[in-house]
Amino acid sequence: MVGTRYLRSTHHRGFVSFVAFMSMAGLTLGVAVLIVVLSVMNGFERELRSRILSVTSHATLMGLEGALQDWQGIRRLALQAPGVRYAVPYIEARAMIANGSRVLGSAIRGIDPALERKATGIAQQVRDARIEDLTPGSWKIILGTSLARELGVARGDLIVVIVPEGSATPAGVVPRMRRVEVVGTFESGTYEFDRSLALININDAARLYRLGSDVTGVRLALEDPVRAPEVVRDLALALGGGYYVSDWTRNHANFFQSIELTKGMMFIILLIIVGVAAFNIISTLVMTVKDKQDDIALLRTLGAIPADILQIFVVQGVLIGLVGTLVGAALGIVLADNVEVIVRGIESVFGIQFMDAKVYFMTDLPAYVEWTDVARVCGVAFALCALATLYPAWRASRTQPAEVLRHE
């Protein structure tokens, strides 16, 4: 009762109560900002992972010599392996795409439209067309939106695909070229793929790169993408070895390692705000102890022991920390859940763009609240506040009544 009463503003100690309120506000702000930042990092990681997996495979099985023979048997055995949902053949190689004077490098991926729709999510991201429009022998192509924009092409335009392999002619060796028709675009939301990937039918790709019946490899869609390294390794060993295996965690390891590193550093840096709030609690309680010297002395003369005085100020500091932490957690969760709306509003008002796809691989700012992060932030913040109360409370408990009341 005494500890909570000291938190309420009175005529004589309004400044102390104001400092206590500011300490609580600083703690609230620190906890809220920390939760929002961690939620944005979590959302960025989840969104990046889902977008990458929509256009790439969970794992791939490729031939060591650059082409995979007897891929039908390999695909049949892969579908029987535990944890594998789909296995689709593909052909992928580099090429130059030209539209007039505009020439850009890109990856050409030959796919089986029917199998691709089942195995990945890229079929749902095709615009102005259907992935089934890539029929064998039609020489049609679907470009990433950023690639199509930089080439200045739209549906129905003709472009030239230049393969970095020469053909002997009377005039010498010239690159192999093929004119294809743009039938649509796809947008994965990830600039890396939208700028550097084009899709054609797998039979056309085999003719273009002169692979015959061979393919580059077999792409696997798994029930649990996290187990991709283990599943594809076991599959390669079951097939007798002699294959080059890869998975999404290896191909894009730098992305996710940088996100985890940034998340850890942001937690440490923003924890300083909570530390400042904890120091403010120390100053608040020290001023309270100084202001309440007479009250402490009277309580001691009435029979209160040092432990009672200690508890009074510990309760006061703990309440500041508890209320600030809980309010900050609630505010942080609300802001994290609405961060995309807030960012869009700021962008529309000031005419700026926070997320440049060329830098951040996506244009929006997703957020995902992980309750383990909320619990960790609240736990650390409350622990700092509890520790901050010990010194002022100990100092109050050491007050000598005779010294204080000597001049009364």
Image (spheres, rainbow, N blue to C red):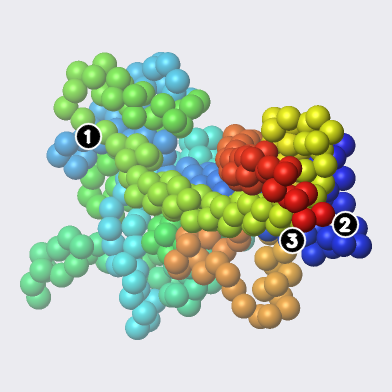
Disc 1 target residue: 244
Q: Which is more N-terminal, label 2 or label 1?
A: 2
**Depth-wise, is mark 1 or mark 3 nearer the camera?**
3
- Quarter containing the N terminus: top right
- The residue shown at (50%, 66%) is 357
Circle 2 crowding by C-alpha within 10 Å: few under 14, some 14–19, many from 20: some
- Quarter containing the C terminus: bottom right
Q: Which is more N-terminal, label 2 or label 3?
A: 2
* Residue 116 on image: x %, y %: 49, 40
Q: Which is more N-terminal, label 3 or label 1?
A: 3
Q: Can residue 354 be seen in the rendering of this structure?
A: yes
* Residue 142 on image: x %, y %: 48, 58
Amino acid, disc 1: Tyr
Circle 3 crowding by C-alpha within 10 Å: few under 14, some 14–19, many from 20: some
Amino acid, disc 3: Val
Q: Judging from the image, what secondary structure is the residue with disc 2 in?
A: loop
Q: Judging from the image, what secondary structure is the residue with disc 1 in?
A: strand
Disc 3 target residue: 19
Q: Nearer the viewer, residue 106 or 16?
A: 16
Q: Nearer the viewer, residue 147 or 31?
A: 31
Q: CA distance from mark 3 to mark 2?
A: 11 Å
Q: CA distance from mark 1 to mark 3?
A: 64 Å
Disc 2 target residue: 9
Q: Is residue 42 rendered to the left or right of residue 72?
A: right
- Mark drawn on residue 16: none
Image: 15 above or below 55: below
Amino acid, disc 2: Ser
| Residue located farthest toward the bottom when viewing the structure as drawn | 101
Circle 1 crowding by C-alpha within 10 Å: few under 14, some 14–19, many from 20: some
**Depth-wise, is mark 1 or mark 2 nearer the camera?**
2
Image: 373 above or below 254: above
- The residue shown at (67%, 53%) is 286
